[in-house]
Amino acid sequence: MPIVLNLAGWLLFVVWAVAAGLPSLWFLGRSLRRQSDRVAEPIEWPFLSVVVPARDEGHKIEAGLRSLLAADYPAFEIIALDDRSRDDTGVIMDRLADEVNSNTDESVRGPELKVVHIRELPEGWLGKNHALHVGSQQARGEWILFTDGDVVYHPETLKRSLKYAVARNLDHLPLFPNIEAAGLFEAAFVACFALIFAAGTQPGLVPTRFPWFYLGVGAFNLVRRSALERAGGFDLIRLDILDDVKLGKLLKRTGSRSEVLRAGEGLNIRWQQSAWACITGLEKNAFASAGYSILHLLFVTSVTAAVFLGPLAGTLFAGGARLGFVAALVLSHLLFGVNSRLFGHSFWVFPLLIPAGMAFLFAFLRSTWITLRQGGVRWRDTFYPLDVLRKNVYR
């Protein structure tokens, strides 16, 4: 029995070192600022279209659009899509467009801001996926940036990201944003989300040819137009709730070259307004990430629970065979603190690793229960039946 416990403890240590340690090491040196400083500027800056879909984001959309309008990039347009909003999102977009486009002083004239009002959702589309599709059809740029309406940009982010993508001859560049949080547990939860997401996607392996390593980030998916057209646009993922990640999968499957960077101060987003809102905010996506498979979901949550709770349980109860468990416990908390720091939070949230991990598992189980109970996903006042979603998962 002591031999089995020893092996179990060191196995958990290896799992944490590989699954969470490798992406942590990758991200330490992969900031947008650092990497873009290492490459030369393009001879000619490509024209960029920034596609910003939003629905009922009147309290955030102006800050996001104004940060884009202030971007230090020489040739770009902004396409803001009001996706059936019931609040003043569309009104704010129109006001900003009038303000920007009425400026006739060429010396201070910025990018064009075009507003598209989507009044109806066609059959066979998810709302955001359709908005992204509409935006891509309106875009004139050689490159297209798909972003969210609540993302606040540093003035240099567009220039740095295009500089890096062009120099590296990429087709797709997702950026991880800093996620703001108001309280300690909210910060711990979003740091845990980043840790698990990075462990599941292994961003350091995205540039390789291995087809099962791919990534997309809703806050920042920069795509070469020719690569998007080669992939067939959004048609194959029109009913896939994981639109951002599956865009990365679609692009990689059709031969695109992708890399991933950490935006650092270049991108900031307040994901939700509280820790509980972060949990409920996963209601749409969590069960979808398991392909709407109950067995897959139970397997993933069971393994995750063992990986999070195993080191503590072994440390407390494994007696003389506890060394591997202690090492895994220390490493897991250290990596959690490092990831928290990497994505804009304090290292000192590390004692909250296990509570945050259990809250994350609860969010997944809650998403599964609600989706099964109501027979589908209800999101932004639109209901999508489960059988339809299952049939249209992009695999």
Image (cartoon, grey):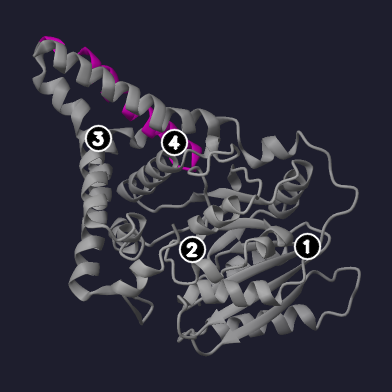
**Which region shows up in magenta?**
320-347
**Is the N terminus in the top left, top right, bottom left or bottom right quadrant?**
top left
Q: Earlier in the sequence, mark 2 or mark 1?
A: 1
Q: Secondary structure at mark 4?
A: helix
Three-letter amino acid code at the position of disc 3: Phe
Please say if the residues under marks 1 and 4 sit with CB atoms less than 8 Å apart.
no
Front disc: 2 or 4? 2
- Residue labelled with disc 3: 308
Front disc: 1 or 3? 1
* Residue at x 43%, y 59% (from the top left corner): 271
Distance from the alpha carbon under mark 2 to that under mark 3: 28 Å
Distance from the alpha carbon under mark 1 to that under mark 3: 44 Å
- Residue labelled with disc 4: 339
Number of residues whose C-alpha sits closer than 10 Å to that of mark 2, classed few (under 14), some (14–19) or many (20 or more): many
Residue 88 % position (x, y): 51, 84
Q: Is residue 22 left or right of residue 38?
A: left
Q: Secondary structure at mark 3?
A: helix
* 328 in magenta: yes
- Residue labelled with disc 2: 243
Three-letter amino acid code at the position of disc 4: Asn
Distance from the alpha carbon under mark 1 to that under mark 4: 34 Å
Number of residues whose C-alpha sits closer than 10 Å to that of mark 4, classed few (under 14), some (14–19) or many (20 or more): many
Three-letter amino acid code at the position of disc 2: Asp
Front disc: 3 or 4? 3
Q: Earlier in the sequence, mark 3 or mark 4?
A: 3
Q: Earlier in the sequence, mark 1 or mark 3?
A: 1
| The quarter of the displayed image where residue 75 is located | bottom right
**Is the C terminus in the top left, top right, bottom left or bottom right quadrant?**
bottom left
The label on residue 142 is 1
